[in-house]
Structures are given as structure tokens and as C-alpha cells.
Image (tube, grey):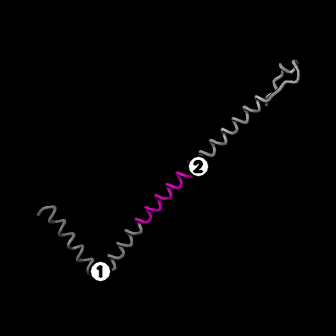
Amino acid sequence: MGTVEEGSRVATSLIDGLKQQPLALAVIVVNLCFLAFLTYIAHEMGDKNRSDSQASRDMIQQLVQACIEKRSENQKSLVFKDSSDVSKDIRP
């Protein structure tokens, strides 16, 4: 007997068994639906986590850039009162 015939025999006996036990078929269908739902939820959570992480990285990058710009403005705005102060380092 070939593999195809054996597979068809198993499928037929499975279908006959499920005809006799409709509750078992219902449990299988509910479990498959539950697995599909969990897969969907996990996918959506992964997408949300990726977008949240990207937003955090963007915000941090903006803050770093603002700090760098502010520091360079502060260094440019240092004004010496007279020529004797030129030798003093007044940077923080």
C-alpha cells in the first residue's frame, strides 16, 4: 500500500471519528482560532514596540542635537572683557 492510500485512510478515519465526537471538532476549531488570535496580537505588539523604540531614538537624537547646538552657542558667546582675560580659560 502506498503513502497516499495510507494518508487517505488516516484522514477518512479521522473524519469519521470527528463525526462521532462533534465536541472534539469544536475544541480543535476553537484552539486554531485562539492560536491565530495570539499570533495576530503578538505581531501587533511587535509593531507597536518597534514604532515606540524608533520614536524614543528620534527623541533622544533631537535632545542630543539640541544640547550640542546649545553648547556651541554658549562657547561662541564668551566675550573677553579686556586683553588681560584672553589667557584665561573661562569655558565650563
In the image, taking residue 30 as reference, residue 54 lies left or right, namely right
Looking at marks 2 and 1 on the same chain, the residue that comes earlier in the sequence is marked by 1
User: Mark 1: which amino acid?
Assistant: Gln
Residue 47 belongs to magenta span: yes
- Image quadrant in which the C terminus is located: top right
Q: Residue at x 86, y 21 (%)?
A: 85
Vertical order, 63 against 42 (above or below): above
Q: Residue at x 46, y 58 (%)?
A: 43
Residue 10 or residue 87, whichever sits in front = 87
Q: How many marks?
A: 2
Q: Residues within 10 Å of mark 1 (few under 14, many from 20)?
A: few
The label nearer to you, 2 versus 1, is 2
Over which residues does the magenta segment extend? 35-54
Q: Position of residue 44 (x, y in %)?
A: 48, 59
In the image, taking residue 1 as reference, residue 75 lies left or right, namely right
Q: Residue at x 50, y 54 (%)?
A: 47
Residue 70 or residue 13, whichever sits in front = 70
Q: Quadrant of residue 4?
A: bottom left
Vertical order, 23 against 43 (above or below): below
Vertical order, 67 against 15 (above or below): above
The residue that disc 2 covers is 55
The residue that disc 1 covers is 21
User: Mark 2: which amino acid?
Assistant: Ala
Vertical order, 12 against 89 (above or below): below
